[in-house]
Amino acid sequence: MLKKKNFSRTVLILGAACATQSSVAAESISEAFTKGEAHLNLRLRYESVTEDQSAGENTGSALTLKSRLNFKTEAYHGLTAFVEMDDVSNFAGSSNDGVNGEISEPLIADPVGTELNQAFLAYKNWNTEFKYGRQRITLDNLRFVGHVAWRQNEQTYDALSVANSSVDKLKLSYTHISNVNRIFGEDSAVGDMEMDTHLINANYSFAAGSLSGYAYLLESDDNFAGFKRVDTDTYGVRWQGKTGIVAYNLEYATQKSSGDNPADYTANYMLAEANIDIAPVVLGLGYEVLSADDDGFFITPLATLFKFQGWTDNFVNRGLGNISEGVKDAYLTVSGAAYGMNWQLAYHDFNSDQNNASGGSDLGSELGAVVGKAWGPYSAELRYASYSAGDSSPFNGGGLTLIDTQKVWLTFNVNF
């Protein structure tokens, strides 16, 4: 892990390399650097969490700043280099960040520290791009492979990725992942997950939409026993279409345990959602199922989990993205724009796929609201979510107890 005292030195080195933009490929390696681009992003966020436990309210808050500096060279014979540093500082609050040992406080998973977020070489030729090194990987809607950009410390991957578009309307990608740099940072025992994982994704565009097929073969090479649960083979298909004022998504996947997975199971994933544009608002309807059986449950350990199953993260389950009885999520959203601001209201109704030991399936509900505005290089967002536990709150063999939770986020961004 890079030490904080070296961060300012890195900023000066990369900043000195910044030059004006150029649309002409460099004629030498030195020119590739002098014509490169540097960018700085600052994201200040206040997060507050209140959990209504039986012994009373448990509250926590944090005011954190993510400082991101990156530099990309100009292309030289199709070859470019990219490097990106992130620094996360905490100015107020002492809540549990997953590393600092404040386990009695609600989790706000934004640990402080300075890390190399991305560093890769890329080569483009033959309608193909090759990337090798630490990189951001996002596939389809991030349900299976994402970057968890919501958290201050982003999830990136040490990987070799290849993307090809030689055939008209067809995009093919293959990725081999050797390590996942998780949001908890390198000071955490679970901050890195060594892997021997293969991701295959194909997408073909039609006049009415696009069809994706994928195979995600996950295998953990890490000695941490908890990571063996991610050893899975997932195969699926996704259709994104639009007809008139309705845009819709349909998806189905099946997952089977593999490798050293301690569970032996087969489970399914299903999604059906539609967004209806009835100006001045867009109405969204969705139903998502992560199923379970007696031997295991469908997991998505590389996903951007904050995007799914509500914003309070009650079903994250240590990063697996599901609980042992499975989750059914029926949701409704209404979004629009007014006075130069974008807004959205969201409601989720949760039930388990299988009843728990006491025969219940009610997992509760969540109401969320967000409003945001962007102007020039600046943007700001206010977000709120309130989760109400259902009648069947004790789940996951006693390992997960759902409790009423309220969260507030105020975020300010600036890009240079």
Image: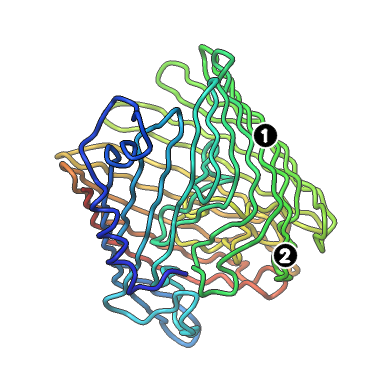
- Judged left or right of residue 140, residue 95 is left
> Where is residue 412 drawn, in percent x and y?
23, 57
> Where is residue 173 drawn, in percent x and y?
61, 32
Q: Quadrant of residue 56?
A: bottom left
Seen from this angle, which residue lies furthest right?
264
- Judged left or right of residue 83, residue 395 is right
> Where is residue 98 drawn, in percent x and y?
49, 75
SS type, badge 1: strand
Q: Amino acid at mark 2?
A: Asn
Front residue of 78/129: it is: 78
Q: Callout 1: few (<14), some (14-19), or many (20+) C-alpha neighbours within 10 Å?
A: many
SS type, badge 2: loop
- Judged left or right of residue 93, residue 121 is right
Q: Residue at x 52, y 54 (%)?
A: 305
- How far is disc 1 from disc 2 in space, using C-alphas? 32 Å
163 versus 7 height, above or below: above
Marking on residue 202: none
Verify CB contact (< 8 Å) between mark 1 and mark 2. Answer: no
Q: Residue at x 50, y 33 (%)?
A: 123
Marking on residue 214: 1
Q: Amino acid at mark 1?
A: Tyr
Q: Which residue carries the number 2 mark?
A: 356
Q: Residue at x 54, y 16 (%)?
A: 169
Front residue of 249/153: it is: 153
